[in-house]
Image: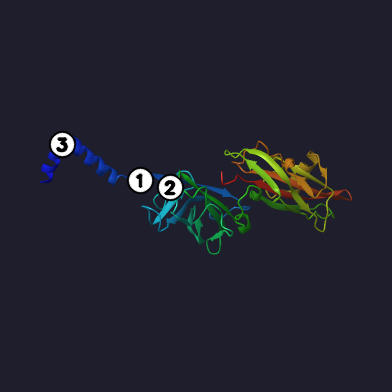
């Protein structure tokens, strides 16, 4: 009877039914995900490198359920099906549950609900915590392919804020000569504003870093804009002394203008290192405090 009905429809009718059937059974367009991780560590992590991120779909996600994965490292083997969301499914909520590293899958405590902003407090990974991480989406309407942005560090305070100025991390080294104590300043870089384009090339800088005197003041400082003269961190006295004497020091000041870091035109795809050296000279000896500042790319781009 079915065949007879199809014959009565003729070739145009049969084609029309076939097209309707194909439309009813066709797959929906999807927005696919990629992931970018920004390293804010101040020391090597025991877990090695991040390979991929894992998570789960929310109950309101259309045609999606269960676990998903996104590669961070090129060629990483995924634990689950690659993350994608039905195009324009803005009701879909994604949660990041773990990060897969060289040593295995490490759970986020707590899991991170992915929104357009970083969480106020980063999650710990491992027990005890091997590192801390935070995450967000570059877009939550899923109108196009999207990105999972991750920042991680051994220091929880470095995985919290969402602006490029806060992505400058600082570590300090003090070296003394003779009986002259090393200066003991603190350096606050939160007042620096560094603006990049979509390729992470620095376009403009403004603001200033603040040097606050401790119990031992210095008389001069120098900003070193290249890594080479200082060698690997932690810096030795000889390396700091050589770099300081090779430059043109400035009388000590509480502010270091952004322009002195010589960042405009630099490519932050590879984090850029600058070093501020403070000198305390007396009795023929010079002691130093050196601040290594690493400028990272903005994961929102």
Taking depth in this image into account, of 102 and 205 the one nearest to the observer is: 205
Task: Evaluate if marks 3 and 2 touch, with contact meaning CB atoms under 8 Å apart.
Answer: no
Q: Residues within 10 Å of mark 1 (few under 14, many from 20)?
A: few
The numbered mark at residue 10 is 3
Q: Is residue 64 above or below residue 269?
A: below
Relative image position of residue 130 (x, y in whole percent): 56, 59
Label 2 neighbourhood size at 10 Å, few (<14), some (14-19), many (20+)? Answer: some
Measuring 42% from the left and 53% from the top, which residue is drawn there? 68
CA–CA distance between discs 3 and 2? Answer: 39 Å
139 relative position to 197: left or right: left
Upstream in the sequence, badge 3 or badge 2? Answer: 3
**Cα separation between marks 1 and 2:** 11 Å
Quarter-of-image position of residue 160: bottom right
Q: Nearer the viewer, mark 1 or mark 3?
A: 3
Identify the mark at residue 28; answer none if there is no mark: 1
The residue depicted at 13 percent of the width and 45 percent of the height is: 2
Question: What kind of element bears circle 3?
Answer: helix
Secondary element at tag 2: loop
**Which of the two discs, 3 and 2, sits closer to the camera?**
3
Residue 279 at x, y percent in the picture: 81, 48
- The one nearer the camera, 124 or 285, is 124
For the point 66% across and 47% down, which residue is it? 294
Tell me the number on the disc at residue 88.
Answer: 2
Look at the picture and state if 76 lies above or below 214. Answer: above
Is residue 104 visible to the viewer in this orientation of the structure? no
| Marks 1/3: CA–CA distance | 30 Å
Q: Earlier in the sequence, mark 1 or mark 2?
A: 1
């Amino acid at each position: 009877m079915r065949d007879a009905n199809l014959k009565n429809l003729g070739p145009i009718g049969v084609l029309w039914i076939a097209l309707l059937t194909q439309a009813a059974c066709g797959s929906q367009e999807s927005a696919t995900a990629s992931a970018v991780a920004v390293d804010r560590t101040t020391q090597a992590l025991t877990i090695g490198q991040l390979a991929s991120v894992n998570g789960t779909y929310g109950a309101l996600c259309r045609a999606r359920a269960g676990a998903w994965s996104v590669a961070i490292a090129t060629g990483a083997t995924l634990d689950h099906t690659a993350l994608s969301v039905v195009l324009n499914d803005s009701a879909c909520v994604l949660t990041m549950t773990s990060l897969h590293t060289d040593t295995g899958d490490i759970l986020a405590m707590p899991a991170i609900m992915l929104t357009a902003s970083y969480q106020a407090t980063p999650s710990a990974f491992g027990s005890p915590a091997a590192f801390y991480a935070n995450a967000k989406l570059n877009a939550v309407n899923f109108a196009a392919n999207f990105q999972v942005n991750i920042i991680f560090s051994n220091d929880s305070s470095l995985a919290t804020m969402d602006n490029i100025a806060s992505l400058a991390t600082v570590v300090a080294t003090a070296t003394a000569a003779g009986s002259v104590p090393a200066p003991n300043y603190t350096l606050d870089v939160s007042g620096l504003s560094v603006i990049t384009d979509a390729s992470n090339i620095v376009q403009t800088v403004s603001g200033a870093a603040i040097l606050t005197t401790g119990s031992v003041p210095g008389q001069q400082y120098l900003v070193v804009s290249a890594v080479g003269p200082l060698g690997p961190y932690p810096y030795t006295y000889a390396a700091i002394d050589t770099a300081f004497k090779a430059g043109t020091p400035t009388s000590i000041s509480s502010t270091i203008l952004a322009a002195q870091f010589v960042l405009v035109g630099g490519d932050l795809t590879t984090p850029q290192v600058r070093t501020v050296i403070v000198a305390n000279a007396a009795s023929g000896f010079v002691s130093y405090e050196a601040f290594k500042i690493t400028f990272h790319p903005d994961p929102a781009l």
